[in-house]
Image (cartoon, rainbow, N blue to C red):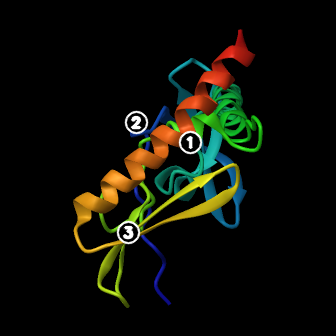
Amino acid sequence: MRTPRKKNIIGKKFNYLTVIKATEKRRDHMIMYECLCDCGQTRIATSWQLRKGEVTRCRKCADQFRKQNLSKFHKINDMHNYDFDGSNPLIITSKRNNSNNTSGYKGVTWDKSRKMWRAQIVFKKKAIYLGRYADIQDAIDARYEAEKKLFEPYLKLFDKKQK
């Protein structure tokens, strides 16, 4: 049986950690290395943890990074859970399409079985069918008119409630 070759990683940088020296400690027969974080703190990790990105910074920096990203996650999550009168103004005003949208326009999709463009809109948790059209522009226009009719009064009411 062949013994694996040891690579010298002392002095190499992995993310925010620079390997200083090998320690006497072992984990699963792997050498534990003492590493210096960019902030000046030290952290001990195996070469496998460093190479695979399992350990990227000292514990202090890792905790700060986790807290920052958690607060960003909560802000985004709070926006998407915001409900006003049965609908979400942030989603209504979003221009983002679903990944499976075939037309590039929100609420307009291709109906393969009928070979026509289908227009629909979702408002107050209800899908409203706007019709099928042979021409994509007709479907886009139908969707746009429905947005004006449904969303504009709703968004004005929402703005008044916010003041």
Q: Which is in the foreground here, disc 3 or disc 2?
A: 3
Other residues around mark 2 within 10 Å, as few (<14) / some (14–19) / many (≥20): few
Q: CA distance from mark 2 to mark 1?
A: 63 Å
Amino acid type indicated by mark 3:
Thr
SS class, disc 1: helix
Farthest top residue in view: 163
Please state the horizontal and vertical placement of residue 55, each as a whole percent of the image.
Answer: 59, 46
Q: Do the residues under discs 1 and 3 have CB atoms within 8 angstroms? A: no
Q: Do the residues under discs 3 and 2 have CB atoms within 8 angstroms? A: no
Q: Which mark is residue 109?
A: 3
- Residue beneath the point at 30% across and 64% down: 103
- 82, 48: nearer the viewer: 82
Q: Do the residues under discs 2 and 1 have CB atoms within 8 angstroms? A: no
Please state the horizontal and vertical placement of residue 2, each as a whole percent of the image.
Answer: 46, 85
Please state the horizontal and vertical placement of residue 112, each as a whole percent of the image.
Answer: 34, 86
Write down the residue under mark 2: 11
Q: Which mark is residue 81?
A: none
Q: CA distance from mark 1 to mark 3?
A: 20 Å
Q: CA distance from mark 3 to mark 2?
A: 56 Å
Q: Which is in the foreground here, disc 2 or disc 1?
A: 1
- Residue beneath the point at 61% across and 55% down: 31
Amino acid type indicated by mark 2:
Gly
SS class, disc 2: loop
SS class, disc 3: strand
Corner quadrant of residue 12: top left
- Residue beneath the point at 70% across and 25% down: 60
Please state the horizontal and vertical placement of residue 90, each as a whole percent of the image.
Answer: 59, 35
Q: Is residue 96 above or below residue 131?
A: above
Corner quadrant of residue 155: top right
Comes first in the chain, label 3 or label 2: 2
Write down the residue under mark 1: 150
Amino acid type indicated by mark 1:
Leu
